[in-house]
Image (cartoon, rainbow, N blue to C red):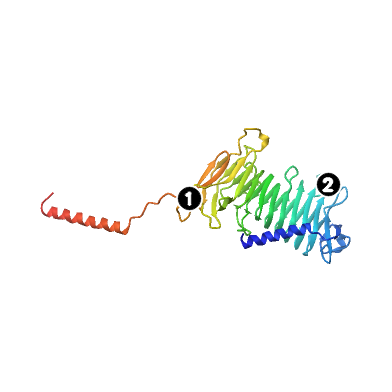
């Protein structure tokens, strides 16, 4: 494990541990203001600024009250640490412009209660063990930096809207909902998406120590385990339906292989009418000095239909092919990857011998040809002088 990945895993594990190790003297605090700053004690009940210290910890709620609640809004303008934050149920907006550290952050919206949906907006920094949002219209915008142990969005059937335009380092992700991913999402463990649509104009990395920085473009780096049950489109910064998983012409799928049983796997499950659609660039990255033997096979994408379609149903079809392949030859040019597209179930890589290049003529060979030509020319001249045809 690289030192960079080790640091982020330790960070995320630390937040998860923090979430379970709550202080005994916990105070429940509710936001009673309309719109204001976290640092203003008069907007809280009881009138304190929630920030764990001196053996006291805080469980914080921001929620509209009453039959027709207003949408209370709080700006986290300082750098507090708390045990938990609950946003909404009826309504509530929390904007993090400072740095908030919390064991759990939960958002929910029950439409029958009226009011505006619950919202979390991060323009600063959020550090949390768990972030979980669900409910029709509730939303999360991660525009700054987030370090989260487990990030979960509820599936559609009451979609959560979410957007990552900043940098999110996450242990496990993501659930479902309606998502737009223009920033960078680094997932150290596993990535799963289902019950909604995700448009990816930025970068997702899964299970790799080579964490992407902000502003990488339309790339999925897979060294771990990823599963898709909704609609994910690489190279589509807006929402997209119609392909269970699509790699656009401007997008890159980077497959990382570091051992015979250590490589990125993507499982796509949907109906046969929603194919896996391939274009763009396949990058094949060999890591940890691993060189596969000729004949080794790596199944990198697997598709299947849900059980709802009955016995004998066809898997999700795979259409198209990668238009460009980087890293196709390896082992000093002696081996290469054959890409095998099974239209009804998988994409796999097979290590094969590279075709032998046509040898260049040697200097000795060129010299021999030159001498032979001179001898033949001289012989022809002598025969001509002697009148011999």
Name the residue carrying label 1: 336
Where residue 58 sits, quadrant-wise, is: bottom right
Q: Position of residue 308 (x, y in %)?
A: 68, 35
| N-terminal label among 2 and 1 | 2
Mark 2 Cα within 10 Å, few/some/many (few <14, many 20+)?
A: some
Residue 117 seen in the current view: no
User: x, y percentage for residue 223?
Assistant: 60, 53
Q: Position of residue 259 (x, y in %)?
A: 56, 53
Label 2: element kind: loop
View extreme (left): residue: 386
**Residue behind mark 2:** 114
Q: Residue at x 17, y 54 (%)?
A: 379
Residue depicted at 76% across the width and 55% down the height: 120
Q: Residues within 10 Å of mark 1 (few under 14, many from 20)?
A: many
Asked whether residue 111 appears in the rendered view, the answer is yes
Residue nearest the observer in this picture, 34 or 210: 210
Indicate the quadrant containing the N terminus: top left, top right, bottom left or bottom right: bottom right
Q: Between tags 2 and 1, which lies in front?
A: 1
Judge left or right: residue 378 versus residue 148: left
**Which of the two residues, 245 or 93, is positioned nearer the viewer here?**
245
Q: Give x and y (percent) for residue 163.
A: 70, 52
Q: Is residue 309 above or below residue 73?
A: above
Q: Are marks 2 and 1 in contact (CB under 8 Å)?
A: no
Residue nearest the observer in this picture, 174 or 31: 174
The span from disc 2 to disc 1 (Cα, nearest Å) is: 60 Å
Secondary structure found at label 1: strand
Q: Is residue 243 left or right of residue 66?
A: left
Residue extending farthest bottom: 54
Question: Toward which corner of the image does residue 348 lie, by quadrant?
Answer: top right
């Amino acid at each position: 494990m690289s030192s960079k990945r080790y640091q982020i895993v330790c960070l995320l594990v630390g937040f998860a541990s923090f979430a379970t190790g709550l202080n005994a003297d916990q105070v429940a605090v509710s936001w009673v203001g309309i719109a204001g700053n976290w640092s203003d004690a008069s907007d809280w009940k009881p009138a304190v600024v929630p920030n764990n210290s001196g053996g006291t910890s805080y469980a914080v709620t921001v929620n509209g009250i009453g039959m027709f609640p207003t949408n209370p809004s709080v700006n986290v303008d300082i750098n507090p640490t708390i045990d938990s934050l609950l946003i909404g149920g009826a309504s509530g907006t929390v904007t993090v412009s400072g740095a908030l550290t919390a064991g759990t952050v939960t958002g929910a919206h029950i439409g029958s209660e009226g009011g505006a949906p619950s919202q979390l907006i991060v323009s600063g920094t959020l550090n949390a063990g768990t972030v979980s949002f669900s409910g029709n219209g509730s939303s999360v915008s991660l525009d700054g930096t987030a370090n989260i142990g487990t990030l979960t969005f509820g599936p559609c059937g009451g979609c959560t809207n979410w957007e990552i335009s900043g940098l999110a380092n996450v242990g496990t992700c993501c659930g479902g909902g309606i998502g737009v991913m223009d920033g960078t999402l680094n997932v150290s463990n596993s990535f799963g998406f289902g019950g909604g649509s995700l448009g990816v104009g930025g970068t997702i990395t899964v299970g790799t120590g080579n964490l992407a920085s902000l502003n990488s473009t339309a790339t999925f780096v897979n060294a771990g385990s990823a599963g898709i049950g909704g609609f994910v489109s690489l190279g589509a910064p807006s929402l997209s339906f119609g392909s269970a998983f699509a790699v656009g012409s401007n997008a890159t799928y980077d497959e990382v292989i570091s051992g015979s049983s250590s490589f990125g796997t993507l499982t796509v499950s949907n109906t046969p009418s929603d194919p896996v659609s391939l274009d763009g660039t396949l990058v094949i990255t060999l890591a940890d000095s691993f060189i596969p033997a000729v004949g080794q096979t790596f199944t990198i994408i697997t598709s299947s239909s849900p059980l709802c379609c009955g016995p004998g149903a066809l898997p999700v079809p795979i259409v198209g092919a990668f238009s460009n392949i980087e890293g196709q030859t390896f082992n000093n040019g002696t081996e290469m990857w054959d890409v095998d597209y099974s239209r009804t179930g998988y994409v796999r890589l097979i290590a094969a011998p590279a075709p032998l290049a046509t040898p260049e003529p040697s200097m000795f060979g060129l010299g021999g040809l030159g001498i032979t030509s001179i001898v033949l020319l001289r012989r022809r001249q002598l025969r001509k002088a002697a009148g011999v045809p």
